[in-house]
């Protein structure tokens, strides 16, 4: 097992993420752009869901996003516990922000 | 993970159901086996399937005990996330050059807690869910993965270091690099499995262009209880589909895409998925458009009739084209063969293309065994020795030798293991590296020399 640092701190030795960043020349411009766009989309979705549960088409319309992109992002948020299924309306599932 | 030793009796390439079966059969006979898998987990395609036909048993309930058995077997060494670079004949055995890909963590220390995955800030399409769902840049491959160890996908890493900070065992080691290892093996079994025909193979069907034209493997994940949506929904907008069409022979029996053969499983997996869909979505209209229904296995014809009885519609028709219309619904232009070839357009919420099977890996440049015209490994004696390849001492099991269903893949893998065991005995291969035998159950076979 590696050396144990203080809680919340990393070991500033050769194992640090800085080594990997340096070796790979940092994030590619394409990845940087994709990451930024993902963060923008998530912010929009969270804001839209604050007013109550919504279906994917409703979220897409509220956030001015492409529905398939909205769907993928909502499912990612669901997988990692940010969003839960609320109920159904007209053949669509309503998604809500997870409380707490 | 244990270090790769200098010698083994056998190397099995591919940790899917066929590879695991071959490795277990050899291990049970007391042979030392190196089981090499290119992905971070064993289990292959089968562990991602929802249910198997015709019994409708849970696929992972069958596959995961086999995965656990292979990973714990005292005679089998598992080597995941490792690629085979070159296998060369060396006397009666082979010299194998392998490339271990870096996980960027010490897997002996990783406890599979997934705290790193939860802390990672970027989502990327998950290969295990065929892109329908998401994973993080650092992730545990899936809930049933063996080993339950994280892996860092450096191509999508944002280098924030959060994974390192939350790891309770401080197992990350970002200095890791790919490592080349050489070992000697007495025999090789290729069980490198399958891929499905590329979704874009037939441009007129709109695969990869229209989100509601799905692959059968993506549908398997959508139907799975641990799938990306938790239920069956349309990828375009999350609608609960009310009408679904299956297009049979969408990636097989078609010279125009270079796949003239029948893939043998498409009729049955489509019937199975369609039947299950009627269970999952009440009132669903599900229709299979087929050229012939090939339900040739034990209990398959009865299963087909059951599906029709329970509401799956089957229409003898050839789909010429699929187009996308408003709301991303899809329209099939179909020639109805039982209605004098009348052409009709039919609208659906979702379409599944019943894609065929193609080899999961090609041996070219790596192993000097010949492939047949269809790309699967050539077996010169298919009737008397279906697992023998053109290179002595190299055998094939599962779909690497040609399209087949799970039961046939398992049987053939067992046959490959028996051929490999015979080869080891005939060549008197000695691995020399065998450690202490865990129990008599796993003892090496006696040679009847009477010295004792």
Image (spheres, coloured by chain):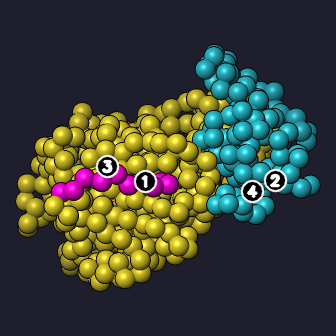
Q: Residues in magenta? A: B341-353
* Residues at marks 2 and 3, CA–CA distance in whole angstroms: 38 Å
* Residues at marks 4 and 3, CA–CA distance in whole angstroms: 33 Å
Which residue is label 1 attached to? B347
**B192 or B305, which lies in front?**
B305
* Residues at marks 1 and 4, CA–CA distance in whole angstroms: 25 Å
The image quarter in which residue B281 lies:
bottom right
**Subunit under mark 2:** A
Estimate how packed mark 4 is, as few (under 14), some (14 to 19) or many (20 or more) residues with alpha carbons within 10 Å: many
Colour for chain A in the figure:
cyan
Q: Position of residue A50 (x, y in %)?
A: 88, 45
Determine the secondary structure under disc 2. loop
Q: Is B350 within the magenta?
A: yes
Q: Is B315 within the magenta?
A: no
Residue at x 12%, y 64% (from the top left corner): B385
Which residue is label 4 attached to? A94
Q: Are discs 2 and 1 located on one and the same chain?
A: no
Determine the secondary structure under disc 1. strand
A87 above or below B53?
A: above
Which residue is label 2 attached to? A53
Residue B335 appears left or right of B46: left
Give the mark nearer the N terminus: 3 vs 1: 3
B150 above or below B85?
A: below
**Subunit under mark 3:** B
Discs 3, 1 touching: Cβ within 8 Å: no
Using the rendered image of the protein, determine whether residue B8 is visible from the camera's viewpoint: no
Q: Nearer the viewer, mark 2 or mark 3?
A: 3
Disc marking residue A2:
none
Q: Position of residue A38 (x, y in %)?
A: 71, 32
Q: Are discs 4 and 2 located on one and the same chain?
A: yes
Disc marking residue B333:
3
* Residues at marks 4 and 2, CA–CA distance in whole angstroms: 6 Å
């Amino acid at each position: 097992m590696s050396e144990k640092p203080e809680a919340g701190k990393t070991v500033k030795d050769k194992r640090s993420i800085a080594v990997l960043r340096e070796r790979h020349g940092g994030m590619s411009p394409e990845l940087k752009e994709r990451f930024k766009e993902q963060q923008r989309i998530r912010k929009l979705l969270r804001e839209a869901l604050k007013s109550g549960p919504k279906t994917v088409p409703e979220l897409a319309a509220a956030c001015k996003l492409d529905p398939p992109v909205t769907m993928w992002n909502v499912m990612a948020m669901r997988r990692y516990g940010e969003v839960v299924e609320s109920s159904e309306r007209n053949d669509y599932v309503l998604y809500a922000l997870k409380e707490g | 993970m244990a270090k790769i030793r200098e010698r083994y009796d056998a190397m099995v390439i591919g940790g899917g159901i066929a590879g695991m079966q071959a490795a277990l059969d050899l291990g049970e006979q007391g042979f030392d086996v190196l089981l090499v898998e290119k992905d971070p987990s064993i289990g292959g395609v089968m562990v991602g399937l929802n249910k198997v036909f015709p019994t409708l048993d849970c696929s992972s309930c069958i596959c995961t005990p086999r995965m656990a058995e292979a990973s714990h077997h005292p005679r089998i060494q598992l080597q995941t996330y490792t690629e085979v670079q070159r296998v060369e004949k060396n006397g009666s055995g082979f010299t194998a050059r392998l490339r271990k890909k870096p996980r960027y963590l010490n897997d002996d220390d990783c406890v599979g807690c997934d705290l790193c995955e939860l802390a990672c800030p970027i989502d990327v399409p998950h290969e295990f869910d065929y892109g329908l769902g998401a994973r993080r840049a650092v992730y545990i491959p899936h809930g049933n993965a063996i080993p339950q160890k994280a892996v860092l996908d450096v191509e999508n890493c944002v280098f924030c270091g959060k994974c390192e900070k939350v790891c309770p065992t401080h197992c990350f080691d970002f200095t890791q690099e790919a490592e080349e290892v050489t070992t000697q093996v007495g025999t090789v079994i290729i069980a490198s499995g399958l891929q499905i025909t590329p979704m874009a193979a037939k441009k007129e069907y709109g695969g990869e262009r229209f989100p509601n034209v799905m692959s059968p493997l993506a549908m398997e994940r959508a139907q799975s209880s641990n799938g990306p949506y938790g239920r069956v929904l349309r990828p375009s907008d999350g609608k609960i589909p009310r009408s679904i069409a299956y297009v049979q022979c969408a990636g097989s029996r078609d010279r125009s895409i270079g796949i003239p053969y029948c893939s043998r499983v498409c009729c049955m997996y489509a019937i199975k998925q369609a039947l299950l869909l009627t269970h999952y979505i009440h009132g669903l209209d599900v229709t299979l458009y087929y050229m012939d229904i090939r339900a040739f296995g034990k209990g398959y014809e009865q299963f087909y009739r059951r599906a029709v009885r329970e509401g799956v519609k089957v229409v003898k028709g050839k789909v010429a084209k699929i187009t996308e219309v408003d709301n991303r619904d899809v329209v099939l232009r179909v020639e109805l063969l039982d209605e004098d070839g009348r052409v009709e357009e039919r609208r659906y919420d979702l379409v599944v293309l019943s894609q065929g099977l193609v080899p999961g890996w090609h041996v070219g440049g790596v192993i000097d065994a010949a492939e047949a015209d269809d790309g699967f490994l050539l077996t010169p004696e298919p009737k008397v020795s279906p697992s023998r390849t053109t290179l002595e001492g190299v055998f094939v099991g599962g779909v690497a030798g040609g399209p087949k269903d799970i039961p046939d893949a398992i049987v053939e893998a067992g046959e490959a293991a028996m051929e490999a065991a015979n080869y080891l005995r005939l060549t008197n291969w000695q691995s020399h590296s065998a450690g202490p035998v865990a129990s008599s159950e796993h003892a090496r076979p006696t040679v009847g020399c009477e010295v004792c």
